[in-house]
Amino acid sequence: MPHNTPSTLLKQFKEIIAPLFEQNGSINSIHLAQKEKLEYFMALLLNRAIATSSNPNDQSFGADYIVVSKLVVENNAQLHYWGKIYWLSAPKTHRCHRGFQDPFYCLISFKNESVEISNGTFGDYSFSDLDSDLWMENNIDWMYDFT
């Protein structure tokens, strides 16, 4: 893949997620046409946010992809994204769910053709069981904010 600048990444990301905002409520991710691209771009955007962190320990994280667990659109303007991060690397002191996985959540807003990611968080001090289809309904004790 060619070198991706932040603006190029956001443009490509917008092309993938824009169709999701045409609906409201829960989205069945099994039928998403660009599910794999969405998961890949979420990891790229998280990696970019982590790479610019002022904490050197945070820079040891590297996400491979962020598998969609649940997507919910509100008012054709906000997308709640719950997923499981599959790490390529993480700090030695970071504890996560088995298999180098962590829970992930962010809110993606789409207004006037622009995309904004906010409330990004990952990791769980209580190590919730991510194998359950309803893990995101647990009370997650989030470790890190990235936005």
Image (cartoon, rainbow, N blue to C red):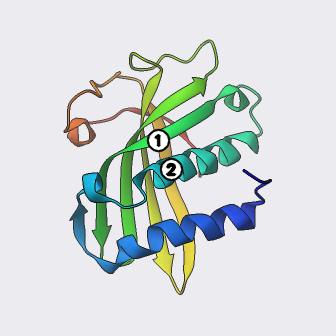
Residue 4 falls left or right of residue 29 = right
Q: Could you say which is closer to the camera, residue 36 or residue 108?
A: 36
What SS does tag 2 mark?
strand
Name the residue type under label 2.
Gly
What SS does tag 1 mark?
strand
Residue 1 lies, in percent from the top left, at 72, 50
Q: Which residue is mark 1?
A: 66
Q: Residue 116 falls in which quadrant of the image?
A: bottom right
Q: Residue 28 falls in which quadrant of the image?
A: bottom left
Tally the numbered discs.
2
Circle 1: is it few (<14), some (14-19), or many (20+) Cα within 10 Å? many
Residue 124 falls left or right of residue 60 = left
Residue 8 lies, in percent from the top left, at 72, 66
Disc number placed over residue 120 in the picture, else none? 2
Q: Residue at x 20, y 37 (%)?
A: 133
Q: Could you say which is closer to the camera, residue 112 or residue 7?
A: 7
Q: Residue at x 27, y 41 (%)?
A: 136
Q: Could you say which is closer to the camera, residue 120 or residue 72?
A: 72
Mark 1 or mark 2, earlier in chain: 1
Residue 13 lies, in percent from the top left, at 57, 64
Name the residue type under label 1.
Ile
